[in-house]
């Protein structure tokens, strides 16, 4: 995920406005780039069990939308970047998208769609302008299509943007000097005016973690909310954390184009737990404890004090197929493990209680069999090539520098890689051979620091017999209504 540009300045942070403190104000990003994704019904049950009332998707997957049907959970549905060109060029295609992905779910007992995310961070500088000319027309066409469909008064189109769309000048690096990036300043002004005209929010994704990742000179405490950092003085306003500083930089940029009071939604904010020396459980706990405490207290930021903050945490579960181009941590943003089990104590209500999240229920696993280096293997000359092969098709990011499995010996590294591949391949017999270098074992090779995964298998049975029948009936009804909507 190419979010790295957001952390290039000292003032990289996050915040936004919401409806109620604690879990009531929280949303979760539900990503599905996993070799063995959790069943949608299990994910939705996790959201409900933990009192999470909002979810942000990255598409409009039918299984996910069906599982959300009738739950009352507010949904931010999404349009991927690769669809923007078609929607920008043809208003009719935008109307068709709204018909197929919004109207088909918009009935009593259906899906509570609140936002449509048009693209995802389309103005990242790393995209070299690919989406510069098509994002705004796509946004216009989708919002107009929502209006034409009679739902635009309650379903708003927005564009989740990376924090690199605004900054403060090097000559005056304080939040109050925030402006939109010079190369897209005119475009951003047009987008902000259009959002304001339609009473839609500005959506921004920001990651304080990336400030630490990109610079060893970044002050560690400034990424958190403990008050231990040396403050940044902005004309007498003291900023003690990068969260507040970045958000208020955006507020200043909005003010500069005449919309300083525009509602802001933080589409993504979180802290990974593996894949880098700063991506660890203790830091994730520290970050979330501070963030959630502030949300519960409605603290706001210096530019917008004492206000609710609407935030979508990133993310709900780890995703082992995500691109690691930005860094190995990309596969470890979840507050839950790949199997829906909580990683650490977390009080979503922001009261500082030492409580665990409710885990996913009914998850089934593959047999307790691992793949490890064959202790009798004689010729190890091809070991490196086979490890490389395994890690090409499976997630070996925990082996990297600063990660949970870093520091094992050659046998440990090989066993981890072989097992990762074996699990991704659903423990097929021929997936644990590697030219005679590996053997299946029923002895868990995990260490105190390094977990050797057993993957999940099949769909989980989340509900009891009665509720499962009701859910199935709901899906059938939804499918019938969809067919009618498309007739």
Image (tube, rainbow, N blue to C red):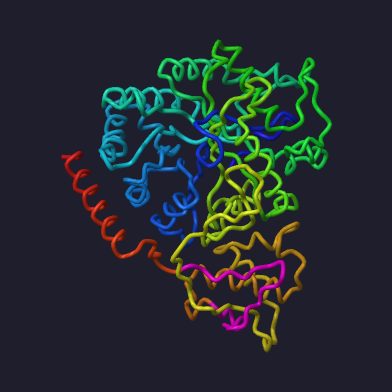
Residue at the extreme top:
258
Q: Main secondary structure of the magenta part?
A: loop
- Residue 268 in percent (x, y) is at 56, 39
In this rendering, the answer to whether 400 lies above or below 113 is below
Give the camera-side residue of 479 and 292.
292
In this rendering, the answer to whether 140 lies above or below 32 is above
Is 231 a magenta residue? Answer: no
In this rendering, the answer to whether 87 lies above or below 445 is above
Q: Quadrant of the N terminus?
A: top right
- Tally of marks: 0
Give the camera-side residue of 356 and 341.
356
Tell me if 413 is positioned left or right of 265 in this view.
right
Q: Which residues are magenta?
A: 432-456
- Residue 304 in percent (x, y) is at 62, 21
Asked which quadrant contains residue 255, the reply is top right
In this rendering, the answer to whether 196 lies above or below 406 is above
Give the camera-side residue of 323 and 309.
309
Asked which quadrant contains residue 249, the reply is top right
Q: Residue at x 20, y 44 (%)?
A: 481
Is 446 a magenta residue? Answer: yes
Q: Residue at x 75, y 30 (%)?
A: 10
Tell me if 205 is positioned left or right of 158 in this view.
right
Q: Residue at x 63, y 27 (%)?
A: 300
């Amino acid at each position: 995920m190419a979010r790295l540009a957001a952390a290039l300045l000292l003032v990289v942070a996050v915040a936004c406005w919401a409806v109620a403190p604690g879990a009531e104000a929280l949303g979760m990003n539900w990503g599905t780039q996993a070799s063995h994704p959790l069943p949608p019904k299990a994910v939705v049950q996790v959201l409900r069990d933990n009192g999470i009332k909002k979810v942000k998707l990255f598409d409009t997957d039918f299984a996910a939308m069906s599982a959300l049907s009738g739950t009352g959970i507010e949904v931010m549905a999404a349009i991927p970047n690769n669809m923007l060109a078609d929607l920008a060029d043809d208003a009719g295609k935008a109307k068709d998208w709204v018909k197929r992905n919004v109207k088909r779910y918009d009935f009593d007992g259906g899906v509570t769609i609140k936002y449509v995310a048009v693209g995802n961070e389309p103005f990242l500088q790393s995209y070299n302008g690919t989406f510069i000319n098509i994002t705004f027309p796509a946004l216009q066409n989708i919002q107009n299509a929502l209006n034409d469909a009679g739902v635009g008064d309650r379903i708003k189109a927005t564009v989740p943007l990376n924090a690199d769309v605004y900054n403060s000048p090097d000559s005056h690096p304080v939040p109050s000097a925030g402006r939109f990036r010079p190369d897209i300043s005119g475009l951003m002004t047009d987008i902000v005016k259009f959002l304001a005209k339609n009473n839609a929010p500005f959506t921004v994704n920001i990651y304080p973690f990336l400030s630490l990742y990109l610079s060893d000179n970044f002050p560690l405490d400034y990424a958190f909310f403990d008050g231990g950092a040396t403050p940044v003085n902005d004309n007498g306003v003291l900023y003690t954390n990068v969260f507040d500083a970045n958000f208020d930089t955006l507020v200043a940029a909005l003010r500069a184009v005449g919309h300083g009071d525009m509602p802001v939604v933080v589409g993504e904010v979180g802290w990974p737990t593996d894949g880098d020396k700063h991506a660890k459980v203790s830091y994730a706990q520290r970050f979330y404890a501070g963030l959630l405490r502030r949300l519960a207290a409605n603290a706001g930021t210096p530019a917008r004090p004492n206000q609710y903050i609407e935030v979508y945490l990133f993310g709900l579960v780890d995703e082992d197929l995500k691109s690691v181009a930005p860094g190995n941590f990309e596969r470890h943003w979840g507050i839950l493990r790949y199997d829906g089990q909580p990683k650490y104590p977390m009080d979503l209500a922001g009261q500082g209680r030492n409580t665990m999240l409710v885990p996913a229920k009914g998850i089934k696993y593959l047999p307790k069999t691992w793949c490890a280096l064959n202790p009798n293997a004689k010729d190890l000359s091809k070991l490196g090539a086979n490890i490389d092969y395994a890690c090409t098709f499976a997630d070996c990011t925990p082996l990297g520098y600063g990660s949970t499995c870093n520091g094992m010996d050659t046998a440990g590294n090989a066993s981890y890689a072989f097992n990762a591949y074996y699990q991704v391949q659903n423990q097929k017999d021929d997936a644990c051979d590697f030219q005679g270098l590996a053997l299946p074992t029923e002895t868990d090779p995990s260490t105190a620091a390094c977990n050797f995964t057993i993957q999940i298998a099949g769909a989980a049975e989340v509900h009891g017999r009665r509720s499962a029948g009701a859910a199935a009936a709901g899906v059938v009804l939804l499918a019938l209504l969809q067919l009618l909507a498309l007739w």
